[in-house]
Image (cartoon, helix red, strand yellow):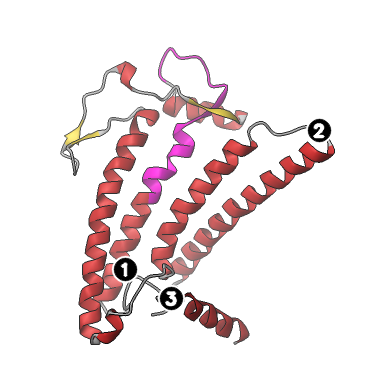
Amino acid sequence: MSGAYRPKTALGRAVHAVEETVIALLLGLMVLVTFVNVVLRYVFNASLVWSLELTLILFAWLVLFGIAYGFKITMHLGVDAVLNMLSSRAQRLFSLVAVAICLVYAALMMKGAWDYWAPFANLAPTTGHWFPTGFEEMKPWDYRGYVPTERIPLPEFLRAPLEYLFLPEGEDPYEKLPIAVPYAIIPFGVAMMLYRLIEAAFRIITGRQQGLIVSHEAEDAVEEAAREKDA
């Protein structure tokens, strides 16, 4: 089972490049913000008061976005000792069972992610205990679009669209970035996981992928990456 992913179409290559660029930007911004704050603190005796909060948000975005990306390129590690003793057909069957379990879990996460984020975006959470059965009837004071982050400043060029989207009528203008923006990665990231799991199921059914994991041995993936680099 290989972690290598090679898009075959121009659109697929473009989307793949965008995803890798986003991941690189998130990681790069984390490093840059932390580096700048360290220099300011130890050289100029100053600091960016919002750096820690921003770094934590970027890390959360990186993790949630990266989980979905991992399903796409089959990079998640797992134990396949039992699977390797089975026939190819049996391996595919058990892989589909694993995908089905992951899909159910991701669907539960999707409901929880939406219900958590929705009030901050002035949207209604869903009803139902396990799966959505409708939307709650919310009172105006139940919406929390007025809640800002603790320290992250709001860029002026984003003020008008964000206040239009999230600020309830009659509330004071934002002084900080509304919390609905960083929290948006929660439902988006889980939705991407669902999408990538459905993609993985389709590839397994059509025989283009053997399973969800790269290998139970991390060094297998490292050796393969080294061979591709040298090729």
User: Does 61 lie within the magenta span?
Assistant: no
Name which quarter of the figure residue 47 lies in: top right
Q: Dots 3 and 1: beta carbons under 8 Å?
A: no
- Give whichever of discs 3 and 1 has the lower sequence position: 3
Q: Mark 3 or 2, which is nearer the eye?
A: 2
Please state if 46 lies on the left or on the right of 190 as rendered: right
Q: CA distance from mark 3 to mark 2?
A: 52 Å
Foreground: disc 2 or disc 1: 2
User: For numbered disc 1, what is the local secondary structure?
Assistant: helix
Q: Which segment did they paint magenta?
A: 168-189
Q: Secondary structure at mark 3?
A: loop
Residue 179 falls inside the magenta stretch: yes
Three-letter code, disc 2: Asn
Q: Nearer the viewer, mark 3 or mark 1?
A: 1
Q: Quadrant of residue 81?
A: bottom left
Examine the rendered structure and indicate whether residue 169 appears above or below residue 56.
Answer: above
Rendered image: mark on residue 45 = 2
- Crowding around mark 2 (Cα neighbors within 10 Å: few <14, some 14 to 19, many 20+) is few
Q: Disc 1 marks which amino acid? A: Ala
Quadrant of the frame with the C terminus: bottom right
Rendering coords of residue 187 (x, y %): 36, 44
Q: Residue at x 64, y 53 (%)?
A: 28
Q: Nearer the viewer, residue 171 or 36?
A: 36
**Residue underneath mark 3:** 8
Q: Residue at x 22, y 63 (%)?
A: 100
57 relative to 201, above or below: above
Q: Residue at label 1?
A: 200
Secondary element under disc 2, as helix, strand or loop, is loop
State the separation of the CA atoms marked 2 and 1.
51 Å
